[in-house]
């Protein structure tokens, strides 16, 4: 029998597996994808010290280390259900059912879709899909594309497409609607992009990031933003135009864009067409937490963390016995934070499995998550620390509630 | 047109050594062993993986990591397989789905 089952072979799951194995636990990792690494696989950017963060290399390093330490892997295996039976968790996969006393959910994040007329045409894909095709499978998503949605992730991937020789004609806003209001507002988009402008490879960055960094220019940019857009890494950022339709007969042939005013409304009569053989939709990421819901975890909607997150503490314990979380399921952040969280989860699981003397190491690792967050190079939500604080208070409130309740009902 | 990225300025050269052949709707294609079926098809310029069960509208990959099920195809007779999560094997027979005989309709008044 395994001591711990880890669902998700991304940065958090792999790190947790390595940590558990180092402490002497038998760990098994399950992932739907055929390659270990999760969202880390597609990442490729230049760091401040001039070295490149290569997601494929980082993933295989972690995976190889885990294999060396005896971690078992079930890749290309989907989990259909999880269930508590007595003191152990049952994990149902399409191949077999696994059982362990400890279960870590490191399922990561999924992309929010932004429905645009024509978005079901072949050639329209999520921006993450284009990233995986380009960097992992080394297949161009097309020759020249348009990205709908301007955010940290889409700007980074636009640059990665560029690195691979794929032409990105423009990044544009989605048409404003109730769902997309935030992401279609020029000022808010400009604010959010401040977190990505500094990560441009020195080879490619010229004008754009400087433009973004000056607050005065930013405000000017919003009000008098040139209708022709601004170029960053030689890619046109269209913050005054929105895609109103994706057209094509049987596949994508292009998009129709229209000028939008500072409130995000389309101006009639300003429609024009841009040729494209692929279109990426970038609606942002949200925590992928269905399995925590199936298990019965309490949830809170915390916008600063990207969506609904299962209630958990800083040791990565949920309120359900033997159930842990780490990585983007706890809130949308970069891979380095996920790695730090995976380490903490691994130590906590080892400690709770009866391995003595880990407390100071656990405390240090919790500290290290904070430090990693403070030095994060890529920040998806600027208020992430506020979101974490909200969650911490929810956890404390739930502990108080528990002591007032008849013994062991919710937390048994 | 789509194509493979053979030389990447950071990731280096692509290992193209392990070719396999497979069929999609009866036509023969070449791909790389263990790459995803969706990648192999895209590298061959195939974007339409199925036609919608009711409307018959063409569909291709959307999320490419198993969440959306838009890339579902029939592999070796097994329906509903996600092309993006399927490692390509030599001799694989892949068929795309099309409109079903009976339309799925909401028959309540005002929903026709």
Image (tube, coloured by chain):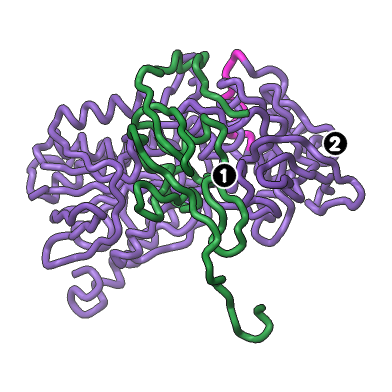
| Residue A366 in the figure: left or right of residue A212 | left
Q: Nearer the viewer, residue B66 or A8?
A: B66
Q: Quadrant of residue A91?
A: bottom left
Regarding mark 1 in the picture, which secondary structure is present there? loop
Quadrant containing the C terminus of chain A in the rendered view: bottom left
Tell whether position A23 is magenta. Answer: no
Q: Which residues are magenta?
A: A193-203
Give the labeled residue for mark 2: A227
Q: Which mark is residue B48?
A: 1
Please indicate, yes or no, whether residue A331 appears anywhere in the rendered image: no
Q: What type of secondary structure mainly makes up the magenta span?
A: loop
Residue drawn at x 43%, y 28% as measured from the top left:
B31
Residue drawn at x 29%, y 24% as measured from the top left:
A61
Within 10 Å of disc 1 (Cα), the crowding (few <14, some 14-19, many 20+) is many
| Residue A259 in the figure: left or right of residue A21 | right
Residue B51 placed where, x, y %?
Answer: 56, 54
Label 1 lies in what chain? Answer: B
Q: Nearer the viewer, residue B56 or A313?
A: B56
Residue drawn at x 50%, y 24% as measured from the top left:
A45
Residue A104 placed where, x, y %?
Answer: 25, 50
Please indicate, yes or no, whether residue B25 appears anywhere in the rendered image: yes
Residue A317 placed where, x, y %?
Answer: 26, 54
Camera-side mark, 1 or 2:
1
Label 2 lies in what chain? Answer: A
Colour green, chain: B
């Amino acid at each position: 029998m395994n001591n711990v089952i880890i669902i998700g072979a991304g940065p958090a799951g792999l790190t947790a597996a390595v940590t558990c194995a180092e402490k002497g636990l038998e760990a098994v990792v399950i992932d739907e994808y055929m390659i270990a690494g999760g969202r880390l696989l597609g990442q490729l950017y230049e760091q401040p010290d001039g070295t490149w963060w290569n997601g494929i290399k980082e993933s295989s390093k972690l995976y190889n280390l885990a294999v060396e330490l005896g971690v078992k892997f079930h890749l290309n295996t989907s989990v259909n259900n999880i269930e508590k039976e007595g003191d152990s968790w049952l994990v149902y996969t399409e191949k077999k059912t696994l059982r362990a006393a400890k279960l870590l959910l490191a399922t990561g994040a999924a992309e929010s879709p932004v429905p645009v007329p024509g978005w079901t045409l072949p050639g329209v894909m999520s921006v993450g899909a284009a990233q995986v095709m380009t960097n992992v499978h080394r297949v161009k998503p097309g020759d020249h594309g348009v990205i709908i949605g301007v955010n940290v992730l889409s700007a980074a991937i636009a640059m990665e497409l560029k690195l691979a020789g794929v032409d990105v004609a423009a990044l544009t806003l989605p048409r404003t609607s109730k769902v997309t209001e935030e992401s279609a507002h020029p000022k808010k988009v400009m604010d959010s992009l401040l977190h990505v402008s500094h990560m441009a490879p020195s080879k490619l960055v010229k004008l754009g990031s400087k433009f973004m960094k000056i607050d005065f220019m930013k405000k000017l940019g919003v009000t008098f933003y040139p209708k022709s857009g601004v170029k960053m890494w030689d890619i046109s950022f269209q913050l005054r135009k929105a895609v109103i339709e994706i057209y094509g007969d049987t596949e994508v042939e292009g998009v129709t864009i229209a000028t939008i005013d500072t409130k995000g409304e389309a101006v009639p009569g300003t429609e024009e067409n841009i040729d494209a053989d692929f279109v990426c939709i970038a609606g942002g990421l949200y925590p992928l937490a269905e399995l925590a819901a199936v298990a019965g975890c309490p949830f809170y909607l915390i916008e600063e963390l990207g969506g609904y997150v299962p209630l958990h503490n800083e040791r990565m314990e949920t309120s359900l016995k033997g159930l842990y979380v780490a990585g983007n399921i706890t809130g949308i952040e970069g891979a380095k934070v996920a790695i730090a969280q995976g380490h903490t989860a691994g130590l906590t699981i080892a400690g709770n499995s009866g391995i003595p003397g880990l407390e100071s190491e656990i405390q240090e690792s919790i500290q290290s998550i904070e430090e990693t967050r403070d030095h994060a190079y890529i920040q998806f939500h600027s208020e992430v620390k506020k979101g974490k604080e909200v969650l911490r208070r929810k956890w404390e409130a739930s502990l108080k509630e528990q002591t007032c309740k008849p013994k062991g009902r919710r937390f048994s | 047109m789509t194509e493979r990225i053979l030389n990447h300025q950071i990731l280096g050269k692509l290992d193209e050594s392990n070719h396999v052949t497979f069929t999609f709707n009866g036509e023969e294609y070449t791909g790389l062993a263990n790459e995803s079926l969706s990648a192999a098809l895209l590298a061959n310029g195939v974007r339409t993986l199925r036609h919608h069960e009711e409307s018959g509208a063409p569909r291709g990959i959307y999320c490419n990591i198993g969440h959306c099920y838009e890339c579902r195809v029939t592999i070796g007779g097994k329906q509903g397989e996600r092309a993006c999560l399927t490692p390509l094997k030599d001799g694989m027979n892949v068929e795309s789905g099309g409109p079903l005989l009976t339309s799925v309709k909401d028959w309540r008044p005002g929903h026709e």
